[in-house]
Structures are given as C-alpha cells and as structure tokens.
Image (tube, rainbow, N blue to C red):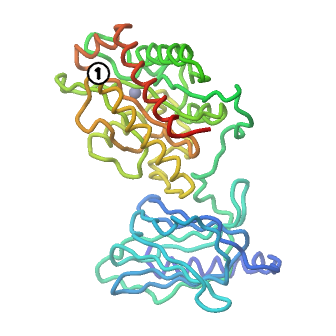
Amino acid sequence: MRLHDAYRAVAQLCLILALATAAIPALAQSPTVTGVRAGINADATRFVLDLTGPISFDVFVLDNPDRIVIDLSEVAWELSADSQALDAGLIEAFRYGLFEPGRSRIVLDVGGPAAVRDAFLLAPSANFGYRFVLDLAPRAAGEVQEASLQATSVVTDAPVFEAAAWDGPPLPAEKPALGARVIVIDAGHGGVDPGAIGASGAFEKDLTLAAARELRRLLEARGGYHVVLTRDSDIFLKLGERVDLARSNGADLFISIHADSIADSSVRGAGVYSLSETASDDEAAALAARENKADLISGVDFVNVAYDPLTTNILIDLAQRETKNASSEFAGLVAVEIAQAVRLRSNAHRFAGFRVLKAPDVPSVLLEMGYLSNPQEEADLRDPAFRERFMGAVVAAIDDYFASHPQ
Ligand SMILES: [Zn+2]
C-alpha cells in the first residue's frame, strides 16, 4: 500500500467510525498509559501503548535525525523506569512526557528514514484495554513522507497484537507445597513427534523423557522442590501446552530438555538457551527454528500465536524483562554447573526465540543435552549413569539459582 493510501484508509476509518467515537463518553480524568511495547510484525515495526481510555493522536515524521513524533491528547504515565530502553526493529529509543497542557508527546528515535504505515486506536477486548498502535517501515528512496497523520479516536475492533494476550488456562492461584520451589520439567517432543533421531536410531523424545525423570528423581531426593513433568509418558504436547503447564502449576523455573541432531556428526557438546528477541548467532537461530517446528511436524495446523515468533518475532514486553533476565541468569548457572559434568559447546549459553520459553512470568531455559548425530553423545545420553551425573549438575544450578532468589 502506498503511503498516502494508508493515510486515506485511516482517514476513511476515521469518518466511518465517527459515530463510534462520538459514543465514547468523556472521561473525567486523562487516560493513563500503562504499558509500552514494540516488536516486529510482518515487515513492520509495531509500537503499542496500553491505555486506560481513548485518546486522539497526531503522528508525524521528522528527519535529521530521524524521529517519529506522536502527539496525544493529554495522558498520565504509569510506566516502569526501564521503559526508555525500548529497542526493537526501527525503534532505537523512546521518550515521553507532557508537551503542553492538554497534549502529551512521545518521540521515537528511529534507525533511519521511516514511514508511518498505519496508526490507529483499538477498542478494549477481552485481554486488553484501549491500545494505540503504530506501524513503521523503512522509507523507500524517493518516497515522499506526508507531513502528518491525524486521527481522533479511531476505534476499530481489528484483531491485532493479540499475540501478547494470554489465552491459556487461568493463572495459577497457589503454590502446591509449603515453601517448596516448583520446578516444571519439560521433556521435549513425544508421541507423534520423535524429535531428533540419533546416529544409531535413538529418539530424542525418549532420551528427553529419561533425563526429565532423572532430574525429577534427584530434585525430589534433595527436598524443597515440588516437581512437575509436562509429560511422563510418550505423548505429544503442543509447545503452547507446555508453557501452559509451567504457568498453571505456578512454576518458579521451567526447564525444557532436548537433544539436537545435525549433519556434521563430529559436532558435540551440550548447550543451554534462554529467550531473546534476536538470536545470539545463526546456529542458535537455526536450532530454535528446528525446535519451533514441533507443532507443524506433528500435524498441528493451528499455531497459537501467543508463541509464534513468525507472527510476533517475540514481542518485547517490558513486563517480561525481569523474567527474561532471570532466565538468562539461570541459563548461565546451568552452563557453569554442567561444565563440571559434561562436555559443552563453545559459548554454552546462547539466546534465541524458542516458542517453548515464552511464558511471560516463568524463568525458562532450554537445555540441549548434546548431539544425537554424534555417536558418542548418543551413547552417553542412553547411559543412565551419564544422565545421573548430567542431571545432578542441573540440580546444582537450580540450588545456585534459588540461593540468590529467596522466597
Ligand atoms: Zn528438541
């Protein structure tokens, strides 16, 4: 869509929805901005504000340096201190505040000439209040940027940005045991999905289940842990269901266990992964892509968008930052402890967009125990004594983590 067409479309929406807009009662107080997030959606950078009420807005583009300015009817702000660290897609920095009485302003620093593809306000839905949505794209050479895009409370019911919504089971109420840390262990793959297949035919799904059970046994023997397995049999679970189980059980930690397989049979070593918007390296990105295909491989044609990086590219929700930091910290501890027990890849802690790690409130890591394509590692992982040593090191990492995270 050409730029001015986009503007025209928005203007038409504005007219079409004028009645709806007029129906919104005037608020006694200014709406409050309660959240801000950005992510990559298709080929656009999407910027979203969560609001407690409707607003009018005016978006314009500035050059030298490249910025996007969003003027809003006056709003109050309830954003966490690190909100200005917003950095996704074209957006490099974010500032906000009252510009003049009756008008608030947001300035986005963008990484190059940008065009406004769309800007609109969404009506509240089941999972969200009002949202202001802005889509940005790189501006093509020679493309004329219209001076300004204005709208007054364009409210649509378009189903956008639902990816951040939680549509799984209700959040857990209580922890099951007094003071016990809840560890949810996820044996990767299962049922119709064998996962990787080893040099001599071992299935990843069987080795992950054996390791998960061993980790449970060791944690229960240690005491102070309440352990839940996402599966304790050879059944298929969708990636989203695994995340649901972490949340519905009130997990303090979620550990998804896997083993990889690649063409080069000489490659070996364990690695641990935590979630990131951008992969630490191409190899980690390729691994995440393989693991994320589990649902498709298993004939699930409905992919829950809440976990689909292809549609959301992992939304950067500032509320999730603490969880991501905790996940990264725990992954680092796992890498340190398992180094005592098994061989590691170089850069044993890496980052990528694994769908199974996307619980917004549960620190989560994915442990790749090794390469089934390497005959020695396949044999190791089939050996109960090896698994005991390996999982014992994971227990040590879990102890380490809670030592610095008191109840
Ligand atoms: Zn796997």
So how many labels did they put on this image? Answer: 1
Q: Which residue lies furthest to the bottom in this view?
A: 100
Answer above or below: position of 37 versus 20. above
Q: Residue 369, percent across and down?
A: 35, 24
Q: What element carries label 1?
A: loop
Instruction: Name the residue tied to disc 1.
Output: 342
Q: Which residue lies furthest to the top in this view?
A: 384
Q: In which quarter of the image is ligand 1?
A: top left
Q: Residue 173, percent across and down?
A: 74, 37
Say which quarter of the image contains residue 32: bottom right
Q: Residue 317, percent across and down?
A: 53, 56
Q: Quadrant of the C terminus?
A: top right
Q: Looking at the image, which is closer to me, 218 or 198? A: 218
Say which quarter of the image contains residue 184: top right
The local crowd at label 1, few if under 14, some if 14 to 19, many if 20 or more residues have their Cα within 10 Å, is some
Q: Looking at the image, which is closer to me, 229 or 125? A: 229
State the residue at coordinates (54%, 84%): 149
State the residue at coordinates (80%, 76%): 24
Answer above or below: position of 127 versus 211. below
State the residue at coordinates (71%, 63%): 129
Q: Specify whether 190 is left or right of 384.
A: right
Which amino acid, by three-letter code, is at mark 1?
A: Val
Answer above or below: position of 134 versus 222. below
Q: Looking at the image, which is closer to me, 396 or 157? A: 396
Q: Residue 213, percent across and down?
A: 50, 14
Q: Specify whether 295 is left or right of 265.
A: right
